[in-house]
Amino acid sequence: MPSGCGSLAVCAERLRRSGMESLSSKPQQRLSVLSFEQVQRLSDMMDEVVSIHGRGNFPTLEVRLRDLVAVVRSKLEADMPVRDIRLNGGGASHVLASDPQPYNDLDLIFGVELTAPRNFERVKAAVLGSLMDLLPEGVSRKRITTCSLKEAYVSKMVKVNHDGDRWSLISLGNSRGHKNVELKFVDSMRRPFEFSVDSFQIVLDSLLLFYECSDLPISENFYPTVVGESVYGDFQEALYHLQKKLIATRCPEEIRGGGLLKYCNLLVRNYRPARSDMKALERYMCSRFFIDFPDIAQQRAKLQSYLSNHFVGRAEEALRYRYLLLLRRVVEQSTVCLMGHERRQTLQLIEQLATLVLSQEQALQGRLGPQAQGAPGPQGGPQPAWLYQNGYFYAPVIPSYTTCSCSCNAPTGWMAACSS
């Protein structure tokens, strides 16, 4: 009987927990209707002119984001139905947050059916056909092929079709310092977010329909109903994390790369863990990162790519050194899956990148002059910078510039000495 009672108690506890989980994941808690201010910010973003820079002699494509979405959707619907269109990532966070949120790319999700392999090619053809239509007037299209358009305007193209994931990504734009437009075509995705603060998706269909049906501008008394979703689960909880700059996730081992690089990116921007067990999750982040990027060459390529894509602009580049120091600390303290020499290799790689980043920063400060250096140095010149090399900081040699009177006729050049 005791064992039976114990079994019943366990079953009751499981039922209670499953009931709580189903309650916490109700669809209505994932969704929220946007306020007028949020819809206004969304409309302003959709009216922004984005620049898609081309390589070589290909011209820069200047197009409103809403027009780009309309062209791509029209091309897609010629061959397949489109379930919905969503704004994702940093752009969605910027729309929803009360304070401005920086974002590097404009991420758009097109819900399509990709069970047929040929649909991946249809997606690619739709995007390249859209680029052809967006070429400026006066550009001869006779000799332009889809292959040349891909080389000119597509910076990244990814196709995933395994283990329940069916999606593709086409990133437009080839210029550093400008926002890229990332078009994601999703049938199914097992893990659509890394952290709660990047889990927001805003359904654009009602706003796009408003643009088609009304010539009137959006006003407080006349605007479409737009719905946002948090794929993290609870919309209000995720929005609270965004407003208060809190870090929360679950099962980081399910994320490609473990979310490690994004986690350190949040830390360097003064986000803080929402829960006390984040240190335990760091171990899962590190383990998954080294599973996905096992050798030092892959780690170097991934880190360099991440720095290039996520720290764009003067203010952002100034964060890179501190970011690498944070990353080194997390890897050193939370990596449990590597052999000793592998761990030392990775730490040395991060140190090398930090040294390179700091030297680039110092060189830039030298070119910019005293305004970038901060306090003036001797005789009004720029203060010599500290030098970081091989894990050590070296202080600069600062000349005294002390003048002395000398009665002899010794030359006044470098290292002049008085014998009297």
Image: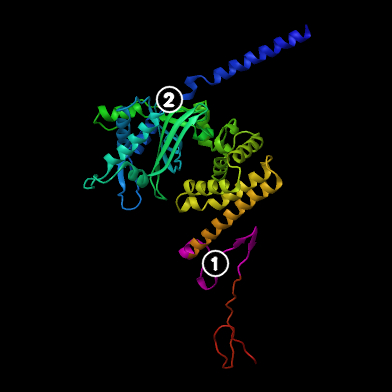
Give left or right: position of 194 versus 127.
right
Which quadrant: the N terminus? top right
Percent x, y of residue 411: 55, 89
Q: Which residue is mark 2?
A: 115
Asked if one can make out residue 205 in the rendered structure from this viewpoint, the answer is yes
Residue visible at 60% across and 55% down in the picture? 352
Give left or right: position of 398 versus 87.
right
Quadrant of residue 117 within the rendered picture: top left
Percent x, y of residue 107: 42, 37
What is the number of callouts on the image? 2
346 is within the stretch colored magenta: no
Percent x, y of residue 331: 64, 44
Residue visible at 70% across and 44% down in the picture? 339
Which comes sooner in the sequence, label 1 or label 2? 2
Percent x, y of residue 2: 78, 9
Q: Which stretch appears magenta?
A: 367-396
- Look at the numbered disc 1 and give the secondary structure of its residue: loop
Q: Which label is found at residue 269?
A: none
Task: Name the foreground residue: 285 vs 322.
Answer: 285
Residue visible at 77% across and 10% down in the picture? 3
Residue visible at 55% across and 57% down in the picture? 356
Quadrant of residue 409 within the rendered picture: bottom right
Q: Which residue is mark 1?
A: 383
Badge 2 amino acid: Thr
Q: Distance of mark 1 from mark 2, alpha carbons?
A: 62 Å
Badge 1 amino acid: Gln
